[in-house]
Image (cartoon, rainbow, N blue to C red):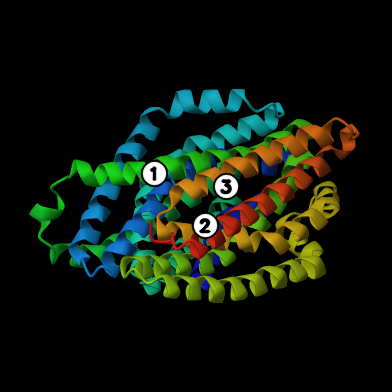
């Protein structure tokens, strides 16, 4: 699961590494802004995966495979509707979002180029979220690994061909990611189709308003959570863009490294989602707690290990992603903040997985809103006393506070529910 997960952010890492070795930092800044916007849009739809995983895992725990497939079809319907809406509204959406970002003309220009192409990944990206939810719930990780390897190998090859070979620049990186997304979808579709043929399609395709209501109830809370999360992540990029092309490029590199670490940690969270969901379906509280304790130990070991590796070899990793000296120097200035974030972030990622398995999305929403509040209170408090050239340090300190708050609030809530016997509510 960890291996499959850490390949996911390689699309962004490869785009960053290839563009980061072009002559000017505004190319990398454009990728940073454009990919941030695409990531926000797609991650706001992350509820498609999370809710799908939770309801299917619990259905399988109850021994009702058909119910799981019905939830899959309902989630797929929602994904198709949202992706079509994004394509129809892409122009006003682009104008609105870019009007809120005070980046340089060059960064804005290349960011728009990236956005205009990558938005056509929407159908593939959103459908893949639903399929990923099904695979995680049913613990069928083999095909997830194959899909991620397929996507990343194709993306790397096309990045090198389009950006280095054809010299298409930012547009080439965007085209590479779009093609890779659809190749991944094609692979997973061929895997699921034989299983769908074995089901009673007349029953599966009969949409049920009650099932939609449950999914929308779960999705509403997760969507609010995702908005709060993306607001904080976007603020890091937007603030960097206002502080200069080199700062936004440095932040982009550090955030990509963080995403790489977070997807590795999410491997334990995904395992917890499936195992906790199955245990809840069987109404087994002791099994839920055993899963949480075991996953917490190994997730903590991995998080601290990655932070140590980042402290020792972070300069080398940054050098792989860019050869622009000004950007490298800035990234190294802020690197200690990223090390601190990696030390503490494992707890929040793990508890996300636990709560998804429990389908307690309200607790996830409330925790994220509290953490978001802490982020902005810290930022605006510190921003008043920092010199202009130190403002980006304030952003990273606020992000550290955000991560700590998420982990603590979710853990305290879990302990209270366990002590009171309310994990199955």
Q: Is residue 381 above or below residue 402?
A: above
The image quarter in which residue 55 lies: bottom left
Q: Which residue is mark 3?
A: 367
User: How far apart are labels 2 and 3 at the CA level?
Assistant: 10 Å
Give how far across and how far down residue 130 sits, in percent. 35, 54
Q: Which residue is mark 1?
A: 219
User: How far apart are labels 3 and 1 at the CA level?
Assistant: 16 Å
Horizontal relation, residue 167 to residue 243: left or right: left
Toward the front, the furthest residue is: 420
What label does residue 352 carry, if any? 2
The image quarter in which residue 294 lies: bottom right
Residue 234 can be seen, yes or no: yes
Q: Is residue 230 above or below residue 295?
A: above
Q: N-terminal of the two: label 3 or label 1?
A: 1
User: How far apart are labels 1 and 2 at the CA level?
Assistant: 14 Å
Q: Residue at 21%, 55% (x, y): give it.
A: 70
Q: Secondary structure at mark 2?
A: helix
Q: Secondary structure at mark 3?
A: helix
Give how far across and how far down residue 248 sits, in percent. 73, 40
- Look at the numbered discs 2 and 3 and tell me whether their residues touch, using CB distance below 8 Å: no
């Amino acid at each position: 699961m960890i291996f499959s997960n850490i390949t996911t952010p390689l699309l962004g890492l490869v785009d960053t590494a290839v563009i980061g070795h072009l002559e000017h930092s505004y190319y990398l800044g454009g990728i940073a802004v454009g990919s941030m916007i695409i990531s926000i849009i797609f991650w706001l739809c992350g509820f498609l995966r999370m809710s799908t995983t939770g309801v299917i895992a619990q259905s399988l725990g109850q021994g009702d495979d058909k119910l799981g497939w019905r939830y899959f079809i309902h989630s797929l319907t929602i994904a198709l509707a949202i992706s079509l809406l994004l394509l129809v509204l892409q122009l006003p959406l682009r104008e609105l979002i870019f009007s809120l970002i005070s980046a340089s003309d060059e960064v804005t220009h290349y960011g728009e180029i990236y956005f205009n192409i990558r938005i056509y990944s929407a159908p593939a990206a959103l459908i893949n979220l639903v399929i990923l939810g099904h695979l995680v719930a049913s613990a069928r990780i083999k095909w997830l690994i194959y899909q991620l390897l397929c996507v990343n190998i194709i993306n790397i090859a096309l990045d090198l061909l389009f950006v280095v070979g054809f010299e298409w620049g930012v547009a080439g990186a965007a085209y590479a990611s779009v093609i890779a997304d659809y190749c991944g979808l094609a692979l997973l579709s061929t895997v699921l189709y034989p299983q769908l043929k074995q089901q009673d399609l007349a029953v599966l395709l009969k949409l049920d308003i009650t099932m939609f209501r449950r999914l929308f109830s779960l999705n509403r809370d997760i969507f609010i959570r995702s908005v709060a999360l993306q607001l904080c992540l976007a603020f890091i990029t937007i603030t960097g863009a206002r502080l200069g092309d080199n700062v936004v490029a440095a932040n982009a590199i550090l955030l990509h490294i963080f995403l790489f670490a977070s997807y590795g940690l999410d491997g334990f969270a995904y395992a917890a989602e499936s195992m906790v969901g199955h245990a809840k379906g069987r109404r087994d509280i002791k099994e839920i707690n055993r899963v949480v304790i075991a996953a917490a130990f190994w997730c903590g070991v991995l998080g601290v290990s990655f932070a140590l590796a980042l402290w020792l070899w972070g300069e080398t990793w940054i050098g792989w992603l860019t050869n622009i000296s000004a950007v490298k120097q800035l990234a190294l200035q802020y690197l200690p903040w990223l090390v601190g974030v990696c030390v503490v972030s494992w707890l929040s990622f793990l508890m996300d997985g636990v709560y998804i398995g429990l389908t307690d999305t309200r607790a996830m929403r409330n925790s994220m809103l509290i953490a978001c509040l802490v982020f902005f209170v810290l930022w605006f408090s510190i921003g008043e006393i920092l010199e202009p050239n130190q403002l980006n340090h304030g952003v990273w300190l606020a992000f550290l506070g955000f991560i700590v708050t998420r982990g603590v609030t979710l853990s305290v809530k879990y302990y209270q529910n366990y002590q009171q016997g309310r994990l199955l509510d």
